Amino acid sequence: MLKNLLIENYALIEKLDIGFSKGFSVITGETGAGKSIMFGALSLILGTRADSQVLKDKLKKCIIEGSFEISSYQLENFFEHHELDYEHECMLRREISPAGKSRAFINDTPVNLTILKALGDRLVNIHSQHAIITLNDANFQLAVLDNYIGLDNEITSYRKQFNKLRLMKKELVELIEIEEKSKIDLDYFQFQFDELEKANLLADEQNLMEVELALLTHSEEIKTAVLSAYQTIGVSDGNILDQLGALKNSLDRVSSFHPNLSSLLARLESNVIELNDINSDLQAIDDSVTHDPNRIEELNNRLDLVYDLQQKHRVQTINDLIEIKEALNEKLNSIGSIDDKIEKLKAKIDFEINEVSESASQISNSRMAAIPKIETKIVELLHELGMPNARFAIDNQIQTELGPDGFDKVRYLFNANKGGNLSEVAKIASGGELSRLMLSIKSMISGKKLLPTIIFDEIDNGVSGEIAAKVGTILTNMSDTIQVIVITHLPQIAGKGNHHYKVSKETDHLATRSEISLLNEDERVIEIAKMISGVNVSDVAIENARILLS
């Protein structure tokens, strides 16, 4: 419920601070006094866009604040979802700077317009002649049907299922695209993998082969050098070992005559032993080194294969090639697993389609069952509003494909005159007829306590006399369950209100200002009498005003 509205520096309003009560409030005033301007300002804290043109004083900022009692609106989850502080009394504020920059706040927390509008839509419904266009909107028509039935929870649950199904279908399309692309690459990946797999590469073999090939390629040189060294050390005439033996004998004969010769003889003996070991190793090397043309060819072929693969894959080592092979194997396995994923996802989608279809069918059945009741109720209200020949129907065209709203696509059909065919509302109804049809619909919904505060801006357009009184009665009945605020120029409606506000325009030598005041009983009598007879209030008009108020 709207409790208070503060407006500063907006259009004709210099400053306005007005409180509102529950029930039925009427707002009256001369044309151009600023009645609709006030609710234009209210719409700013409900999320509509604005610019600096709305500023009365172009050098000062515009401020609009509205306080709302929201304890019965079940909005705790909304505040939690948007990380806002929840309080039973909620404050919405909008500031517009002279430069046209806008800031919005919910309970003093800055928010963007999307969040502000989302909350505003759940707090206030402003009905103006311009808003009647929503009556022709398919989403609005279906929402009225669902709200009347009370399908909010079912619709919310269904849309979660539908969105889940939509995402699964999107995932399936993406997997199929990946599969098609992968199949193009499959043969190429398989060829590369098979080539590396057939090579049967071992981590350290390249270095070992290169060492072995170098030895085999130079085997003749190695054997020649080894044999020469072997003979020089211990085989040929005058070899080193024989010479060392003679040298040792010569020194041994005189070793007793000099103290250092014994140590030198020991060192010579050690060299003789080391040279004998070297000769043994040389003989072993000579025996092990052979010239093997077949092995050389085998090693060259194997190394050529390794070098070709390294060049092809632009790497330097066998370990790199092994890593590439493992990566290719993973790709091949992945491609193979996509088929399994696709089949499993298709099965899940089929199951989910059945679940979503079942939910949509239940919702559709509820809608179909409620349509006759809604049609009857709307026609009754239209008859009360002076349209005795009006006919109204809801055409529900069941679709074969699931949509965000299920299987249903509804159209409102209408004809205000006797005879003739029912047609879509937009094609046949006049402005006054649309206004009364919208009032009937909102009256019906208000009985379900599904609307927030509702504001009617000249809902009485095109009606007068007895019909105006009936409009006032419908608005009064609506105010039993929701807060109703009406801008009106008809005394029959003004007399029905629980609270009466008057908007006036004051002009001095500097500027023109709009002001609003809450009228007491005597002031209401005079105001309604003026609405009946004009500026010159007669006794008869005053008496009629008292009758209307009674």
Image (cartoon, helix red, strand yellow):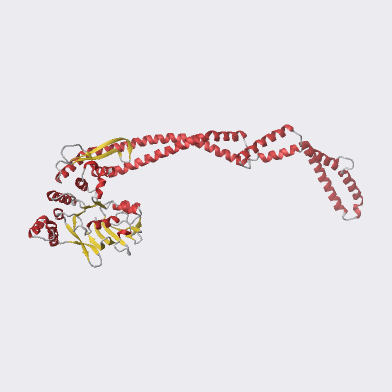
Total numbered labels: 0
Residue at the top extreme?
294
Residue 196 placement: quadrant: top right
Front-most of residues 251 and 434: 434
Horizontal side of residue 175 vs 223, given as left or right: left
Residue 221 placement: quadrant: top right
Q: Which residue corresponds to the image point at 63% horizontal and 42% vertical from the top-left?
A: 317
**Residue 428 in picture, x, y percent from top left:** 22, 41
Whether 134 is drawn above or below 25: the answer is: above
Horizontal side of residue 60 vs 471, given as left or right: right
**Residue 441 in picture, x, y percent from top left:** 21, 45
Query: Which quadrant does the N terminus fall into?
Result: bottom left
Residue at the bottom extreme?
509
Whether 55 is drawn above or below 174: the answer is: below
Residue at the front extreme?
509
**Residue 83 in picture, x, y percent from top left:** 36, 54
Query: Which quadrant does the C terminus fall into?
Result: bottom left
Residue 107 showing in the rendered view = no
Residue 209 placement: quadrant: top right
Whether 64 is drawn above or below 202: the answer is: below
Residue 276 showing in the rendered view = yes
**Residue 179 in picture, x, y percent from top left:** 47, 35
Front-most of residues 125 and 8: 8
